[in-house]
Amino acid sequence: MEYSLDAVDWKWLTGLHSTRARIDALLGEGTPDGVMESYDLDWNMGGVMAFETWDALETVAGEADDKRYARLVLAAFAPLMSGEPKYDELNLADESSGCFYASLSPPTVAVVAQAMSQLDLEKLAEEIGLEDSLEWLRQRAAVVYLARDRGWGLVAHAG
């Protein structure tokens, strides 16, 4: 299983008439003009890495003495990885049988980017302790910052 995180033109996506239409457009042939797919960025999308990294991030946050740091870690990565319903603003998960597990509006992306920008990703990668974790963190940060800079949203997909 692969996990992707795509920057999406939120106005385009929310302009589609239904949840099903949004999913069909995101899964359709070719990449719509309003989408920058993580496939385009040639990044690590492996499911094992995603699960292990999320588990490690939760552990880092849970064991942190500095509670502000713990909150920043979760604010930066929980919306991208946790699969919690509150991070699926367009309710794509139910209609897609969980294939799409996060949809984040531009204001939410701004909050994620703000939290992420306050973290030292090298230090966090050392705390995670997994091979390629720094690359994995930087890849997610690049997509978050791209979406923020364009005023776009994010959509996370597993499949």
Image (tube, helix red, strand yellow):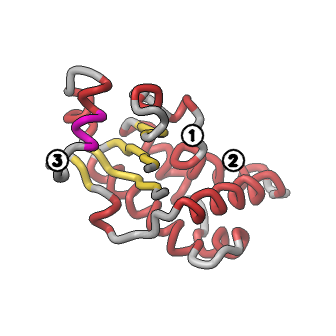
Q: Report which quarter residue 40 is drawn in.
A: bottom left
- Secondary element at image label 2: helix
Give the residue type that dot 1 points to.
Gly
Amino acid type assigned to the residue bearing label 3 in the image? Pro
The amino acid marked with disc number 2 is: Arg
Residue 152 point in image, percent of width and height? 30, 44
Location of residue 63 by image quarter:
bottom right
Nearest the eye: 34 or 124: 34
- The verdict on residue 25 being magenta is yes
Residues drawn in magenta: 23-27
Q: Which mark is residue 32?
A: 3
- Judging from the image, what secondary structure is the residue with disc 3 in? loop
Q: Do callouts 3 and 2 mark residues in contact (Cβ within 8 Å)?
A: no
- The residue that label 1 is drawn on is 83
Q: Which residue is mark 2?
A: 71
- Whole-number angstrom distance, CA of label 1 to CA of label 3: 25 Å
* In this view, the mark in front (2 or 1): 1
Q: Where residue 154 appears, x then y in whole percent?
A: 38, 45
| 91 drawn magenta | no
- Magenta part mainly helix, strand or loop? helix
Left or right position of 25 against 48: left
Identify the secondary structure beneath mark 1.
loop
> Which sits earlier in the primary sequence, circle 3 or circle 2?
3
